[in-house]
Image (cartoon, rainbow, N blue to C red):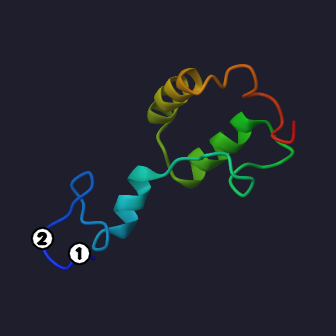
């Protein structure tokens, strides 16, 4: 918490609205703890979509954007271990 002043992220005060705040900023960076080792990357993403209750439309839009931006197309269907 700041000593003075005001602070908001996406219109939320992080320490007062923690659940709403973290629900809007999460991202998977590829840590082994986030990705199921034996499953294709896309399966882990879909599992996390369910866990975080992301709408199908928002998920598909973000998936397209991130697949292109991060050049995931060649290995998104490959098991993480590979």
Q: Quadrant of the C terminus?
A: top right
Q: Is residue 82 above or below residue 37?
A: above
Residue 18: percent from left, percent from top: 36, 68
Q: Residue at the spot x=49%, y=25% of the render? A: 65
Q: Could you tell me residue 4's position as x and y percent?
A: 14, 76
Q: Secondary structure at mark 1?
A: loop
**Is residue 24 placed above or below 46 in the rendered structure?**
below
Judge from the rendering whether residue 78 lies leftward or rightward of residue 54; answer left or right. right
Residue located farthest toward the bottom when viewing the structure as drawn: 3
**Which residue is nearer to you in this view: 53 or 66?**
66
User: Is residue 2 positioned above or below 77 on the image?
Assistant: below
Q: Are marks 2 and 1 in contact (CB under 8 Å)?
A: yes
| Residue 11 vertical position relative to residue 56 in the rendered view, above or below | below
Quadrant of the rendered structure where residue 45 is? top right
Query: Tag 1: Cα neighbours inside 10 Å, few (<14), some, or many (≥20)?
Result: few
Viewer-proximal residue among 66 and 45: 66
Q: Please name the residue that numbered disc 1 is placed on.
A: 2
Q: Which residue is mark 2?
A: 5
Residue appearing at x 35%, y 61% in the figure: 20
At horizontal 72% and vertical 58% (from top left) the residue drawn is 33
The residue at 66%/25% (across/down) is 72
Residue 38, picture quadrant: top right
Taking depth in this image into account, of 20 and 81 the one nearest to the observer is: 81
* Residue lying furthest front: 3
Residue 27: percent from left, percent from top: 52, 47
Circle on res. 48: none
Q: Quadrant of the N terminus?
A: bottom left
In percent of width and height, residue 66 lies at: 53, 29
């Amino acid at each position: 918490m700041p000593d003075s002043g005001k602070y908001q992220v996406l219109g939320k005060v992080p320490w007062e609205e923690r659940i709403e705040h973290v629900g809007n900023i999460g991202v998977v960076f590829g840590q082994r703890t986030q990705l199921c080792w034996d499953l294709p990357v896309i399966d882990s993403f879909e599992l996390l979509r369910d866990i975080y209750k992301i709408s199908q439309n928002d998920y598909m839009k973000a998936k397209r954007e991130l697949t292109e931006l991060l050049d995931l197309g060649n290995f998104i269907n490959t098991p993480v271990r590979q």
